[in-house]
Image (cartoon, rainbow, N blue to C red):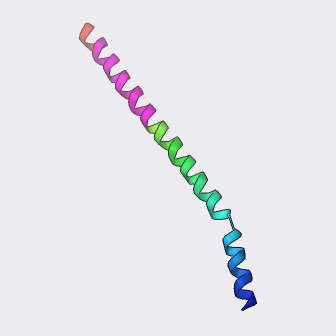
Amino acid sequence: MKTCIVRARRFLNDETGVTAIEYGLIAAAIAIVILVSVQLVGTNLNGLFQEIASDA
């Protein structure tokens, strides 16, 4: 019985999974920012090329 209690306490105090989840959330946030930035730059470049093509 004592080993079950020791194992339960060790499991509850283990925070390694929490760190992995935090890193995963940070990576997801960075990926979203990159995707939005690339999409905005692509839209702006498309508009610029359309303007240049209409002036020529």
Q: Where does the image place residue 20, in percent across and percent down from the top left?
A: 62, 58
Q: Is residue 30 visible?
A: yes
Give the residue at the far bottom of this rendering. Answer: 1
What residue sits 39% from the left and 33% below the top? Answer: 39
Q: Where does the magenta region start and end?
A: 36-52
Q: 11 left or right of 31?
A: right
Quarter of the figure that contains the C terminus: top left
Residue 56 appears in the picture as rendered: no
Image quadrant where residue 8 sits: bottom right
Q: Is residue 12 left or right of residue 42?
A: right
Place of residue 50 in the rendered image (x, y in percent of width and height, measured from the top left): 28, 17
Whether residue 49 is in magenta: the answer is yes
Residue drawn at (56%, 53%), measured in percent from left and top?
A: 24
Q: Is residue 42 positioned above or below 29 on the image? A: above
Along the viewing direction, whichever of 35 and 2 lies nearer the viewer: 2
Q: Indicate the quadrant where residue 48 lies.
A: top left
Q: Residue at x 62, y 60 (%)?
A: 18
Residue 43 left/right relative to 8: left
